[in-house]
Image (tube, rainbow, N blue to C red):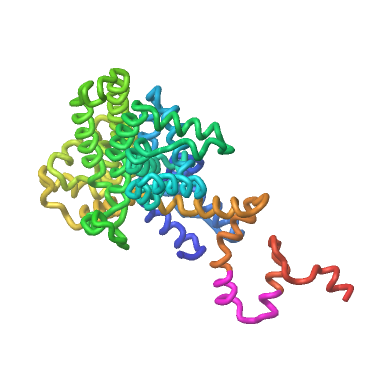
Amino acid sequence: MFGLTYEALRKFCMRVRSITTDFGTERMMLSSRDILMNFVRFLHPGFSSEGLPVMPKLFPRALQIPGWKHLWDGVLRRSLSSVLWFPRFLELAKAVLSFLRQSTNMATLVRSFEARGFTGPAEVLKTTSYPTFAHWRWNKLWACSGALSKVWGCLVRCFDPAPFANSREQARFRDVQAALGSEEFRIQLEFVLWFCGSLCPIQEWGAGCDCHEEAVRAGEAVECDQKGRRLQKAHQHGTTTLDTMLREGNAWSIHDFEGRVGLWQTAQGCVRTAYSFASRKIAFLAVVPWLLVRLEEPGVKAECLRQWDQVTPEHHDLVTREFLDPGQPLRRHVDAMGEDGSRISPELNAAIASLKAIPLGDSIAEEPHARAKRISDAARGAARPWLASTMRLDQNLVDAHELSHDREDRQMMWSNYKSLLKTGPPKHVARNA
């Protein structure tokens, strides 16, 4: 992308505005010391760093951004896991979904329904998709509960256990019968569907864009380079959604849960847990340096300067100092702008625009994980070298055709490289021949 010279590498590092992370292994990357000189010296032993400045960080102008989908995924998991009845509900829901996904069970169900004249429910069962619940992606629970809710009435009214009396998986079938015979499970399913339907759209909002919101809402596939760049509106959207959710939960009465006091109390507690936990999770968006992206809004300038004055300059983030330190050029432009966000200079506007371009979406970072998992599932004893070489296979083949035009040289590169697969004869065989 940018070459292996010190100047090109330094320019690249200075242009990095954010690192989006799920706060796993790479969570400390933003705090990395400036290792660039040592790195270039390793590549070019004759490199001299005399007179070159050492930066306080490798990426001094970058903000740390928690992955938006991961953030709300954690809220969903933690909130539902705080409910005492949820583990058993999840166990029963998985049993029913697994039961319905098996083609033999579905064929038996459909025949049983049609033989008794329930052609409509049989058609509903056949045309419904039954997703697999993935524990590492909790918003999948929304799709799972939606599928169950769609067919639940048909199953409860028309299900006949007789055709499955000799089923091999009797333990799971007992769970299916327990779920179908439980009124509490039905009420729990309705609550879980509402709860997921309140939180999961926030995840999708973070991966979208303002310019194609209507098209996405209509189900159209849209390609846009502004997708996920919603840092400026993230705090307001999150708090508004949480406030609406809390008001609705507080308005519930015991009659909404058919007189079941325990379900009513735990459901309200779950909503309040989600509100409290999520509010703390997104509170950083109202603090500098992340608040600087909203400098154009009325009152934000005064709040940023107030937060600046509360802490000594050396304890502020480098991005905050870039904007608000009196010794930096941008502070003069911040002082000159109006309290209502007016009179923003072109220099300050460009700096704010660079913050607006920070992506919240973390789906792109999950794609390599998903590919690696698919490869490892299909390979016996797959190790990291196999995963890495397989994931890069298409790119390596393109490079081989574009970078090497001599067939003999290309064969020599392949045979000499310490790869997992070798098409050429072993060296000792070639020497003996």
Q: Residue furthest top?
A: 261
Name the residue rendered at 50%, 51% in the picture. Answer: 370
Question: Could you tell me if residue 100 is visible in this image?
Answer: yes
Q: Residue furthest front?
A: 116
Q: Is residue 402 left or right of residue 187?
A: right
Q: Nearer the viewer, residue 308 or 176?
A: 176
Q: Which residues are magenta?
A: 397-411
- Asked if the magenta segment contains residue 406, the reply would be yes
Q: Is residue 35 left or right of residue 279?
A: right
Number of numbered tags placed on the structure image: 0
Residue 250, located in which quarter of the rendered image? top left
Q: How far from the left and from the top, in percent, is residue 314?
A: 35, 35
Q: Residue furthest right?
A: 432
Vertical placement of 322 versus 269: above or below? below
Q: Nearer the viewer, residue 150 or 154?
A: 154
Name the image quarter holding the C terminus. bottom right
Name the residue rendered at 72%, 66% in the picture. Answer: 422
Question: Could you tell me if residue 70 is visible in this image?
Answer: no
Name the residue rendered at 22%, 42% in the picture. Answer: 237
Q: Nearer the viewer, residue 28 or 350?
A: 28
Q: How far from the left and from the top, in percent, is residue 236?
A: 21, 40
Q: How far from the left and from the top, in percent, is residue 143?
A: 36, 44
Q: Magenta part mainly helix, strand or loop?
A: helix
Q: Is residue 400 left or right of residue 411?
A: left
Q: Is residue 345 left or right of residue 55?
A: left
Vertical placement of 302 versus 5: above or below? above
Residue 195, located in which quarter of the rendered image? top left
- Asked if the magenta segment contains residue 398, the reply would be yes
